[in-house]
Image: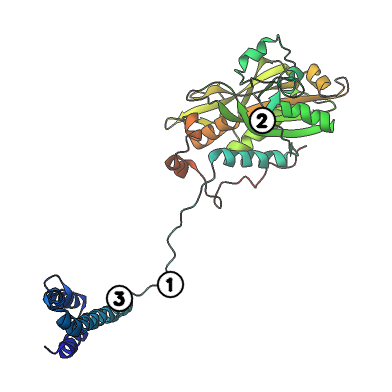
């Protein structure tokens, strides 16, 4: 048998294969388990050493020739198939690219930004403090000594060990300690907000162990409740973007303010959700407690290093999470912290298209 001639014939057939299917059929014919070249390789075991020495190199050379021809033809056919596909399936570069996955601005972060923007227009600076607080800043300096019943209202997370100064440590239950720290550091007059995370041992549809508050503090001479009411009205009108916000101030009790007032706002139900606006005395409207406030207690001013006969002030605090729920229509506070991407894609805001209150609230009087 002329192995060289057989190789040339096989190579010619392989080079004339029209497509990949035809090439695969030839591969099976030559190199498959029952292929002709595979059959020749099997005969080597039955040959004498002399015959194997003579014919072995020729048979292996035939196999190599066929294998190389198949590989080369396969490459050529694949290149041709790709060229044909590119010629038929052109790309329109003028079409917009598909949307890439992007993150979202969490509703809490969005509302924090909106509130900071409003208060900036009112001349307030942003102050911050530690989330791990000592007992004195969190309670005692805010007119809540150890025996004060108001401590039982806060469901506090205490640390088991005291710090190096033998102080009892805890997760702050409100951002009010920032007021004390700022008064001690900066003195008066002051006009600050203190936004941040706070912690209390409570959990249901409207309470979570961690939540967000923003508190305001104004210290100056001749400050009175009228200033407080105007500030809160201006804040809520700008935040809810409505001019029909009506407030009702009710006497209340907070250890760090005197007098203290709960602030109610009118609301109505629209399509099953609460919409802030109108007066609770109007038909179809009700009153809803929204935040607490009052004139800063003399003992708090003294703890902050100020003379209460010279300086007066007001303070207020509101839950950022609650404001977000009211403005953007959420009904379960726990979903804010579940980390569900589906929830965030629905309620979150695009970093480029998030609402802005850049129109401002005007220059305060």
Measure how far apart labels 3 and 2 are at the Cα level. 62 Å
Q: Secondary structure at mark 3?
A: helix
Q: Can you tell which of label 2 and label 1 is closer to the viewer?
A: 2
**Which of marks 1 and 2 precedes in the sequence?**
1
Q: Is residue 73 visible?
A: yes
Residue drawn where x is 80% and y is 26% of the image: 223
Q: CA distance from mark 2 to mark 1?
A: 52 Å
Q: Quarter of the image containing the N terminus?
A: bottom left
For the residue labelled by badge 1, is the local secondary structure a helix, a strand or a loop?
loop
> Vertical placement of 49 versus 121: above or below?
below
Q: Would residue 147 appear left or right of 30 to someone viewing this image?
A: right
Report the number of discs: 3
Residue position marked by numbered label 2 in the rendering: 131
Q: Where residue 100 sits: x, y (%)?
A: 46, 57
Check contact, mark 1 vs mark 3: CB within 8 A. no
Looking at the rendered structure, the secondary structure element under dot 2 is loop
Query: Looking at the image, which is closer to me, 73 or 103?
Result: 73
Residue assigned mark 1: 93
Residue 278 at x, y percent in the picture? 56, 29
Q: Earlier in the sequence, mark 3 or mark 2?
A: 3
Query: Horizontally, is 13 left or right of 290 in the view?
Result: left
Mark 3, Cα crowd under 10 Å, few <14 / some 14-19 / many 20+, is few
Residue occupied by mark 3: 85
Q: Say few, some or many: other residues with alpha carbon within 10 Å of mark 2 (under 14 / 14 to 19 / 20 or more).
A: some
Residue 60, by quadrant, is bottom left
Q: Position of residue 135 (x, y in %)?
A: 71, 20
Q: Is residue 44 left or right of residue 178?
A: left
Label 2 close to label 1 by CB (< 8 Å):
no
């Amino acid at each position: 048998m002329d192995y060289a001639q057989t190789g040339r014939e096989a190579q010619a057939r392989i080079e004339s294969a029209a497509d990949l299917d035809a090439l695969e059929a030839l591969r099976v014919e030559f190199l498959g388990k029952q292929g002709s070249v595979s059959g020749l390789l099997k005969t080597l075991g039955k040959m004498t050493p002399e015959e194997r020495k003579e014919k072995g190199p020729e048979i292996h050379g035939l196999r190599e020739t066929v294998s190389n021809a198949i590989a080369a033809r396969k490459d050529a056919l694949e290149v041709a198939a790709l060229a044909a596909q590119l010629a038929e399936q052109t790309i329109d570069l003028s079409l917009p690219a598909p949307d890439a996955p992007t993150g979202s601005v969490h509703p809490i972060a969005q509302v924090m930004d909106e509130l900071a923007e409003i208060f900036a227009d009112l001349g307030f600076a942003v102050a911050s403090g530690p989330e791990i607080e000592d007992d004195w800043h969190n309670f005692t300096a805010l007119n809540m000594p150890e025996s004060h019943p108001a401590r039982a209202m806060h469901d506090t997370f205490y640390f088991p060990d005291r710090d190096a100064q033998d102080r009892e440590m805890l997760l702050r239950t409100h951002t009010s300690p920032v007021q004390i720290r700022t008064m001690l550091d900066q003195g008066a007059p002051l006009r600050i907000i203190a936004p941040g995370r706070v912690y209390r041992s409570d959990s249901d549809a409207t309470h979570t162990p961690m939540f967000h508050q923003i508190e305001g503090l104004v210290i100056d001479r001749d400050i009175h409740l009228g200033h407080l009411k105007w500030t809160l009205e201006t804040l809520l009108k700008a935040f809810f973007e409505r001019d029909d916000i009506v407030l009702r101030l009710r006497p209340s009790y907070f250890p760090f303010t005197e007098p203290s007032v709960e602030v109610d706002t009118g609301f109505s139900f629209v399509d099953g959700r609460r919409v802030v606006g109108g007066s609770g005395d109007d038909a179809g409207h009700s009153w809803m407690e929204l935040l607490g406030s009052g004139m800063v207690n003399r003992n708090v001013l003294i703890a902050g290093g100020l003379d209460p006969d010279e300086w007066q002030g007001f303070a207020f605090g509101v839950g950022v999470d609650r404001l977000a729920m009211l403005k953007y229509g959420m009904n379960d506070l726990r979903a804010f912290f579940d980390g569900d991407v589906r929830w965030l894609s629905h309620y979150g805001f695009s970093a480029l298209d998030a609402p802005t209150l850049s129109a401002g609230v005007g220059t305060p009087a």
